[in-house]
Image (cartoon, rainbow, N blue to C red):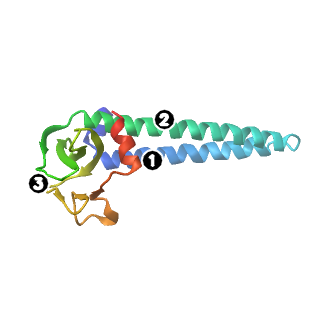
Amino acid sequence: MSHAMAAMPEFSFHFHLAGVAVLALMLGVARAVWFVFSRREGRRERARRLATAATRCGLALGAMWTAIVYGSGAWERTSAHNCRRLPVPDASAKYEAEYCYLSQHKVLVRVYSASRNVLLAQRTFANSGPVRLHWDRGVLVFDPGAADGNGRLVLPPSLRDRLMARLP
């Protein structure tokens, strides 16, 4: 079985995992409906208890999911290698940029304060070729063709970018 799982592409594994999760969710909902409607007396109380339990489980699953996703990203950022600083466009520049290669065709882009050398923002971008970072009037551009501005880091960094830069 482990050999079969190792031979599957990653997206296929996640697709099958999502299918199992949906099946388990459907069975849980069916069981909950049966539990609530099993007897006439006390239906409202059973429904209220079930809603409370479902809310707690949902919040716990959300917290676990957030921790797993963040932990995975933090673990990936520890493997940053071949870091290179971008030359500052002029002497009056407020920011410096650095990019590092990660595993699985990803690049970590960091923005530092030029005067204090403090990390202000960091983001991970998908990369399929050579890195072509450039400055464009207060914007650090990684991929000019990316949809919805996902290939750009606007400066000064947003609150979210500043908070994420503080975390490991």
- Tell whether label 1 touches label 3 (CB within 8 Å): no
The picture places residue 86, in percent across and down from the top left corner, at 13, 49
Residue 18 image label: 1
Please state which amino acid type lies under the numbered disc 2. Answer: Met
Q: In this figure, which residue is indicated by the disc labeled 2?
A: 64
Please state which amino acid type lies under the numbered disc 1. Answer: Ala
Residue 101 image label: none
Element carrying mark 2: helix
Q: Quadrant of the C terminus?
A: top left
- Tell whether label 1 touches label 2 (CB within 8 Å): no
In the visual, does 43 lie left or right of 67?
A: right
**Residue at position x 48%, y 44% in the image:** 20
Closer to the chain start, of discs 3 and 1, is: 1
Element carrying mark 1: helix
The picture places residue 55, in percent across and down from the top left corner, at 64, 41
Closer to the chain start, of discs 3 and 2, is: 2
Element carrying mark 3: loop
Please state which amino acid type lies under the numbered disc 3. Answer: Pro
Q: In this figure, which residue is indicated by the disc labeled 3?
A: 130
